[in-house]
Image (tube, grey):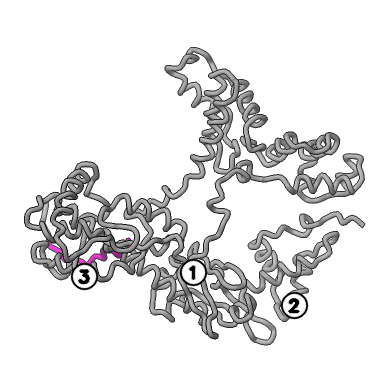
Amino acid sequence: MLRQNISQKQTQKILPKIVLNQNILAIPTLALDNLIKRELEMNPMLEEGVEPDIDVNTDTESAANADTDTAQEKLSEENTDSEITSEEIPEPESKTEDEYNWDEYFENESESQTNYRSGSDTEFDTNNIKDDEQSMYDNLIVQLHMCDIPQKEIFTGEEIIWSLDNDGYFREEIGTVLEDINHKKAGMEFENEEFSEEDLINSLEYIQNNLDPPGIAARNLAECLILQVKRSSIDVRIKELTVRTLETYFEDLKHKRFEKLAAELGIKLDEVKEIFDIIHKLSPKPYSQDNDDFNSYIVPDLIVKKINGKYEVYMNEKYIPTLTINKTYSEMYKNRKNTLDKNTKEYLLNNFNKAKWFIDAINSRRETMIKITEAIIKRQTEFFDNNGENLKPVFEKDIAEDIKMDTSTISRAVKGKYLQTDFGIYELRSFFSNSVSKDDGSEVSTIEVRNKIRDIIEKENKENPLTDLQISAELSKSGINIARRTVAKYRESIDIPISKQRREIINK
């Protein structure tokens, strides 16, 4: 038998405004620059720069009349039911729209918005900031179409290009790509032809040998390096020896078995060193050398300066323009509120709230980032006083307690953010680490331990590099006693290979 029961329960709901603040907080400066442009295009209530040259004391009825049609047109072009809709906007207590004093809201914003800065997208679609994959594929397909080859080869070549991974490697199974080709040929001039594995391999080799950058469409690292060597302009004999080394003695090369290579190739150690130097300069990622430099440069989000003995923190807002509320639309609403149709009125209110929330989120981001950085500096004063030395063990929860915020907020705020100092640029996350106890009872940051391991390795004899056990013994001389396996873990975390792979041939 069906029964109806009445029950009461509590649920936690995150307001859209809070979600907006958290999303803006997680965005780094360069992403903020890109997102602000989209927001300015999407929301007519936002305007870049100082306040528009509009005299609020004069009659703005003509401007309002001129823009009423514009607002109506935007309603027909855009979907006003966007991510943060008017229905989702939380209102104080239980006031209805008619009871809420929107006129006061507009008047208050006119006095305060000019100091607000901005830079994000209401929808927060960060995938639209930059599309490396698309630029890579487009570049290669344009090159392919410029080649004087039959349409059939262009067709198979395009399928190969679209099968490349982000680094430009072709890691798909030939049979899998061949099935896709035979399925997609319908409706084309060669739909009655059968494509074979040989056709696909021929197209793959053509791409490898003719498209740039060299090494593109390689199936593995060794092939990637071989393709680059073959298309280089080095001495023919050394080129042949290098290709032979990569084809036949790749494992010996990886483990730097120089003497064995010299014996197998019948050459001197000097020539082995020359071969190794050539290979060392090659790119392990086929497309890395032609990728956009968007990720090659670090743009600091914050800047710290020592002024009169005190550290001052500033946001890097070079890429973040000032945002204000558009005066024309504000005046249109205030002067013609009772004559506007329902859709136009809802459109203005919806976009106004999104603009106000957006600007508030940027201000909140600035205040939070500065507050966190100031707390970091207070905890790491010795590090800043000593130009990047003596970093102390600090946890995110320590900073959270200092500034009365949640640990998750700290984690979100420091991720992917950088601080510029007078002695270098540091990722904010690098100021947080665990600790290792020293013999004297004091503690040293694990980051400092990694730096000491790096210094020890830089000073080692390159002909006979130190093992992890020997590095552990060197650290103990500084009072840092950690096991060999811990040294190995820290060494790997800073991308330093094992001792055999660090070995070099030194000319005497």
- State the SS at label 3: helix
The residue closer to the viewer here, 181 or 100, is 100
Task: Give the CA separation, mark 3 to mark 1.
Answer: 30 Å
Q: Callout 1: 10 Å neighbours few (<14), some, many (20+)?
A: many
Going by the numbered disc 1, the residue's amino acid type is Leu
For residue 302, which numbered disc appears in the image? 1
Q: Residue at x 29, y 67 (%)?
A: 113
In contact (CB < 8 Å): disc 3 and disc 1: no
Q: Earlier in the sequence, mark 2 or mark 3?
A: 3
- The stretch in magenta equals 6-20
Residue 268 in percent (x, y) is at 92, 45
The residue closer to the viewer here, 137 or 148, is 148
Going by the numbered disc 3, the residue's amino acid type is Asn
Residue 473 located left or right of residue 28:
right
Q: Residue at x 47, y 66 (%)?
A: 316
Q: Is residue 16 magenta?
A: yes
